[in-house]
Structures are given as structure tokens and as C-alpha cells.
Amino acid sequence: MSKLRGLYPSIEPYQTGYLDVGDGHTVSYERVGTPGGKPAVFLHGGPGGGISPSQRRLFDPARYDVLLFDQRGCGQSRPHASIEANTTWHLVADIERLREHIGVEKWMVFGGSWGSALSLAYAQTHPSRVSELILRGVYTLTKAEIDWYYQFGVSEMFPDKWALFQAPIPENERDDMVAAYHRRLTGDDPIARLEAAKAWTIWEGETITLLPDPEFSKPFRDGHYALAFARLENHYFTNRAWLEEGQLLKNANLLRGIPGTIVHGRYDMPCPARYAFALHQQWPDAEFHLIEGAGHAWTEPGILDQLIRATDRYAS
């Protein structure tokens, strides 16, 4: 068996900047690799997750010119944790603004988890701007997917962690956890807001790896990070990401002709594998890798191996 591939060495951006995208929002971006190399854009998860230095290392810096950015309201983008003028379609427009800002005709789009949904929305809106598509931990934002993670499903596998997720919510409100959290995350009580943000974020941080990984879940405990993460995720999921039910799967025909790679963990808790499989059936141009012994996180060895192989393949 061939050796599992790992990340490229640590690298600093060759350029960082801010782009005013309108509506009072400014997004922070960085460019990594070799100027003039193969253009790519990295779309982070969450919504509200922001980018991290380790994500720069998914691409061969000698061959790629990668733009990574913090989506509206999170990371270094401003205003922090803002849900105003913050929808899927605002973000799709931001990606196009960034592409025009750096002056490339088309680019490879790489997105994981929520970033996979955003990648699909972008590619289905602007297929001529996408040279290839790499999707990890596919999420299509159907009601069933949201209910599975936030109402009944993953609760059965993680009863101990589910109890902590339920704790800030009175029993008489637990029939709709997303709505109950929405009231607290958008309410006027800053203490209740922060308590809810941390509980929401820790639930995710501790259920996305196959085995417990304290180092991976540590950032999810930080209050500043949690506030943006929880408010944005809940805002998007409350509004079903401004998508019609099943839209991203129904419109998969718009991806025809775009080379793609889908990488998904067999034991992905937030994003059940059936949706990644359904996408592959609708979009046979894409390679499909269902990784045994893996959960949701991109850092899982089998998932990371296939992501690096995909970026290497498309580089040439």
C-alpha cells in the first residue's frame, strides 16, 4: 500500500489584503504559493470557521497560486460575527469580486463541509469560472441534514456531548434546537449569547473527528471564535442557506464538464455520506473517494491523503 500523503511544509502568504465587498463588510484575504501559478481559491467551513495557516499547506506552493479568505463576519473580516447582509448569495458574489480583484479568468475551487456547499453554489452560478472542483465532507443544506445533526441522529451516537449541547436550552424549547439557539445567539443578553455560542461550537468541535482530538477541538472553546462560528452557522441554518430544498443536488447537471473530486469520510457525523454519494451519481465527472475509518475533519489521515493527491493531480 502506498504511503499516505501529508501536508506541504509551513508557508507564509506572499500577499495579504482586505477587500471592501459592500454592505458594510470587508473581507480579509491572503495569497500563498507562486505568483502566476495555477489559480485556486479555498472556501472554509462553518459558516463562520475562518481560515487557518495549516490550510495553506494543502497545495504545492511551487505550482499553485492560492487565494484563501475569511468569509463575511468571521476570522479577520469585519464586522466580526455580523449576520447583516450575510447570505450564501452575498458570499458567491464575494468570490467573484475576489477573482476579478486578482485578475484570473478561472480557478480551481476547493471547499470542505459548509465550504463544499458554497463551492457548489458558486460553481452552479459561474460554471465557466471553475477549472476544477475539490469537495470534502459534502453538505447540501437539506432539512434532513440539519435535523440529523441538531435535532435527532448524531444525538444517539454522542449522548454525553448531546446533553451538554441541550444544557443551555429549557426542556420546553428542545423540540427545535436550531430555533432555540437562534433566540439566544441573536438576543440582547451578552452572557446568554456567549454561553449559547460556546455550547453550539463545542458540540461541533467534539463530534467531527472519528476519534477524540483535543488539539483539533481546542479553538472551538475560544469565546471570540465561538461567537462568530455559532452566530453565522445558526443564521445560515435557520434560513436553510437561502437555498430551495435539495437545490444543490438538483442543479448538479450544471457541473457537467467540470473535472471534480469528492472526498468523504465513511463515519462523517455532521454530513452523512449518502449526500456525497448522491452528488457523485448526479455528477459522474467527479471522482468519488469514500474514506474508511474517517470522520468529517479534513485532518483525518485518509481524507488528507486524497485531498493532497487531488491538488497534486490538478496542478499538472
Image (tube, rainbow, N blue to C red):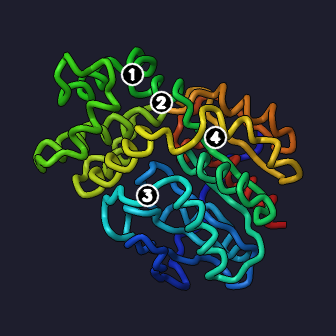
Image location (x, y in percent) of residue 316: 85, 66
* Disc 3 crowd, CA 10 A, few/some/many (<14, 14-19, 20+): some
Q: Is residue 129 above or below residue 304?
A: below
Q: Is residue 147 above or below residue 75?
A: above
Ranked by sequence position, the earlier of labels 4 and 3 is: 3
Ranked by sequence position, the earlier of labels 2 and 3 is: 3
Image location (x, y in percent) of residue 183: 24, 38
Task: Report which quarter residue 158 is drawn in.
Answer: top left
Left or right for 1, reference 74: right
| Residue with the mark numbered 2 | 146
Q: Is the Cβ of the residue at disc 1 closer than 8 Å to that at disc 2?
A: yes
Left or right for 2, reference 220: right
Q: Secondary structure at mark 4?
A: helix
The amino acid on which the numbered mark 1 sits, given as a three-letter code, is: Gln
Q: Nearer the viewer, residue 78 or 23?
A: 23
Q: Secondary structure at mark 1?
A: loop
| Residue with the mark numbered 1 | 151
Q: Is residue 164 above or below residue 47?
A: above
What is the number of the mark on residue 302?
4
Q: Quadrant of the N terminus?
A: top right
